[in-house]
Image (spheres, helix red, strand yellow):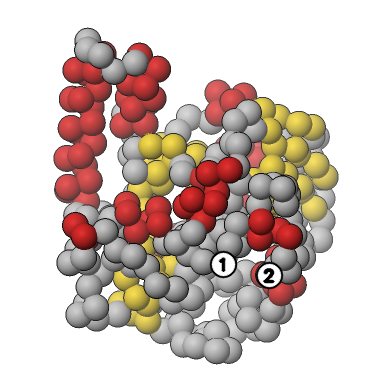
Amino acid sequence: MLFKMKKDILTGEITDKLVFQNRRKIIKAVTATAMASFIPASMSAQIKKYAEIPLGPYSASLQVTDIEYVKNYTNYYEFTTNKNDSTILSKALKTSPWSVTVEGEAEKTGVFNLEDILKTNPLEQRIYRFRCVEAWSMVVPWIGFPLANMLKQFKPTSKAKYVEFTTIYNPNVMPGQRGTALEWPYLEGLRMDEAMHPLSLMATGMYDDELANQNGAPLRLVVPWKYGFKSIKAIVKIRFSETMPATAWNKAGPNEYGFYANVNPEVPHPRWSQSRERILGASIFTPKRNTEKFNGYGAQVASLYSAMDLKKYF
Ligand code: MTE
């Protein structure tokens, strides 16, 4: 997992939130100029659309990871298990038009165009910590909408206890799906109360732009108190179910990747400790960070698990 760092970020500095916000201001200014100059109207409209998205209520005041790391150090096994190569390989995936099939225990099922979903789900920005099960972490300014808002629109029935998400299956453009790294298509799931929690986000963008293909365009899940593998990319199907979904990583390694996958420094992965994390983009001299239970979102989500033994339901 060698990562070819860009020269300008060799120092391993992390972008300060202030710098990121100043960049937003600059983008807005550039957009205003672009309106009256030679940048095509469609392009300036897109820049404007993303740069003006309001900061949502759950954003924390944190240092944002340099975008170059977030875009070029990715996990996307449908393309490759190499974290650097999915940037190029995933360009082959056509993400527009895009539709999402809704099935199972809901009143409103069927096939929905992403464009229509977006018309009724206003976007906001959320700056979230993100912790991978591999013990590295980052801070990402996502753009998206609360998962709960969209799920409510499908009117789940009282039988809906879980919600299952599936990634597109297309081995012609996703070479990893011709192999057996995981059982395809990639499938993830949440308990209904987790899915309806206001922190759960459906992301369509990040860093004032649309999601890059390698980061899960055009629609991915972000659940900040869980390990990153729950944050499934390129979602084409949502199914409400009465029973717990059999998820891709849980099937691949039931003793290593639980269904809940809540970030928990007290429960080691069988092959490594989860007590500390490497900060993506930080210099080799930066000490590892102590991992926080629920990735630091305990005040918001711990009550969802008050009756559970988190060592058993890991
Ligand atoms: N979703 C799909 N469809 N395929 C994947 O391989 N990898 C997961 C998750 N979502 C993955 C996925 C893992 S292991 C992590 S840590 C995060 O995506 C990484 O997100 P990022 O690549 O945008 O950093």
The quadrant in which the N terminus is found is: bottom left
Q: Is residue 71 toward the left or the right of residue 120 in the image? A: left
Q: Dividing the picture into quarters, in which one does residue 238 lie?
A: top right
Q: Where does residue 59 sit, x and y in percent of width and height?
A: 34, 49
Q: Residues within 10 Å of mark 1 (few under 14, many from 20)?
A: some
Determine whether label 2 and label 1 are within 8 Å by CB: yes
Q: Nearer the viewer, residue 153 or 47?
A: 47
Q: Secondary structure under badge 1?
A: loop
SS at circle 2: loop
Position of residue 224 measured from the top left corner of the image (x, y, whole percent) = 47, 59
Identify the amino acid type marked 1. Thr
Looking at the image, which residue is at 55% across and 39% down?
218
> Which quadrant of the figure has residue 208?
top left
153 vs 82, nearest the viewer: 82
The residue tagged 2 is 181
Residue at 58%, 43% (x, y): give it.
92
Point out which mark residue 104 bears.
none
Label 2 or label 1, whichever comes before in sequence order: 1
Image height of 230 relative to 124, above or below: below
> Where residue 137 sits: x, y (%)?
38, 68
Q: Amino acid at mark 2?
A: Ala
Q: Can the viewer see residue 228?
A: no
Can you see residue 262? yes
Q: Quadrant of the C terminus?
A: bottom right
Decide which of 165, 156 is in the foreground and name it: 165
* Residue 81 - label: 1
**In the image, farthest residue toward the top:** 36
Residue 180, position as x, y percentages in the image: 73, 69
Left or right: where 9 falls relative to 179? left
Q: Is residue 39 above or below residue 65?
A: above
- Alpha carbon separation for disc pair 2 and 1: 8 Å
